[in-house]
Amino acid sequence: MTPSEGLLVRRIREGTVIDHIPAGRALAVLRILGITGREGLRVAVVMNVESRRLGRKDIVKVEGRHLSSEEVNRIALIAPSATINIVKGYQVIEKKRVKLPSVIEGIVACTNPTCITRKPREPLRPRFRILAERPLQLQCTYCGTIIDEEDVLEQLEEAGEERR
Amino acid sequence: MPRGNWEGRDAISILDFTRDDLEELFDVAARMKEMLQRGRVPRLLEGRIVALAFFEPSTRTRLSFETAAKRLGAETIGFAGEEATSLAKGENLADTIRMLDGYADAIVIRHRYEGSALYAAEVAEKPVINAGDGKQHHPTQAMLDLYTVKELFGTIDGLVYGVLGDLRFGRAASSFILALTLYQPRKLYLISPPLLRARPEVRARLDEAGIDYEEVSKLDDVLGELDVLYVTRIQRERFPDPREYEKVRGSYRVTRELLERGAKPELRVLHPLPRVDEIAANVDSSRYAAYFLQARNGVPVRMALLSLILGAEV
Ligand SMILES: [Zn+2]
């Protein structure tokens, strides 16, 4: 960790620091977490800083909130390199790597308009299996449609717009 | 003979089955066919009820399943056409399937949404047979297609296949292509206009299975190499520009003259039917036509499937 990064992490007293996000995806990470800024949480977004591992990276710091493992795994969809630092009393007390679950359920919608998961009033959640992690490829369990990282990012952007 | 892995099983995709499963199914189908020809079929499914849930109209497939069930002494219940439409309006698919699950021993479903059969199988306790879901799967069609190839050539491996038509939206074509990945075709040509090429997930499966395949646009280029030509319908509605359709239409018309000029004498033409004009009527009486045999094989193959899944002593 470079000295400046160290400072960024340390400035949080209590909360979560999501580090090693691929450059430019910090806002998508916030969208996956459902954070708009209006929750009253103190949020810091650092974009395009130098990183030894990634070249450039983004960092998101959320004060006063700890992430559940389900939320962590959602992040893996678009930021598989991310690390999660849980901070308490200015100290990183836990470091987690994000890990894609073998099945993705309920986060992403199938892009095929005639997929059964798109039919209204059916009690089922979209479900995908991971075909490839980098670049991301998900396959709908129901209709077989393959969706990629761009589709996922696009959906997150749309979801962000709907909330606004 | 022990058939432990058949009873109670769903048939959602042709890829739910192994090659050994299919070989076993074909053995039973051959015996069914023999019994049908002799006119003596034991009532192996006496007292059983098969539900035919046709949310999307398909007279041929429905009649084929109904015949298969009745030949074996089973009763059928179900709905089709208007009735299905009003039912679909009133309640969701899950509830309709739950109802049928309570009445019948097996459920055959046809629905216009992809994945509906898998969903039905998740909801139902009884075995579910997919009779076509959207553009995705039509496993029993693929079964009877392979059975027909085997009957004609004695083998499914080692042949050169051409699948012609709408490979993007056609479920029979998709299922047939997927089915071939369980075998070892010598070569597979996917013949279609660029607009109607096979979907990415189908091609991903071909790659995964290591099938030697090639996508081509013109039948003429490969016709001379083929042992099996599987023709499917190309619908005008699939084309955003009707002039594009008119252009490809002629190039995918299979005529007797074309076959006599360019095909091997052993070539056999399959088609899931109904056809419009992609195969000329003068092919029907030629040595090449195998599609009527193929259509007739639907009943014994579905008889075999129903009796295996319902655990009849065959
Ligand atoms: Zn889907």
Image: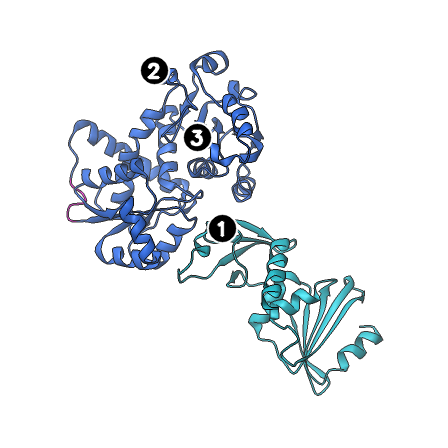
User: Does dot 1 land on a helix, a strand or a loop?
Assistant: loop
- Residue A159 percent coordinates (x, y): 59, 63
Question: Is A81 in front, or is A21?
Answer: A21
Q: Quadrant of the C terminus of chain A?
A: bottom right
- Residue A113 percent coordinates (x, y): 49, 50
Q: Amino acid at mark 2?
A: Ser
Q: Which chain is indicated by disc 2?
A: B
Q: CA distance from mark 3 to mark 2?
A: 20 Å
Residue holding disc 3? B233
Chain B, chosen colour in render = blue
Q: Amino acid at mark 3?
A: Arg
User: Does dot 2 land on a helix, a strand or a loop?
Assistant: loop
Mark 1 and mark 3 on one chain: no
Q: Is residue B292 visible?
A: yes
In the picture shown, does residue B83 fall above or below B196?
Answer: below
Q: CA distance from mark 1 to mark 2?
A: 42 Å
Q: Mark 2 Cα within 10 Å, few/some/many (few <14, many 20+)? A: few
Quadrant location of residue A17?
A: bottom right
Residue holding disc 2? B285
**Which is more foreground, mark 3 or mark 2?**
3
Residue holding disc 1? A113
B44 within the magenta span:
yes
Chain A, chosen colour in render = cyan
User: Residue at position x 39%, y 51% from top?
Assistant: B116
- Span highlighted in magenta in the image: B43-47
User: Residue at position x 33%, y 47% from top?
Assistant: B55
Residue A82 horizontal side relative to residue A119, left or right: right
Are the residues tagged 1 and 3 within 8 Å (C-beta)? Answer: no
User: Residue at position x 18%, y 43% from top?
Assistant: B44
Quadrant location of residue B99?
A: bottom left
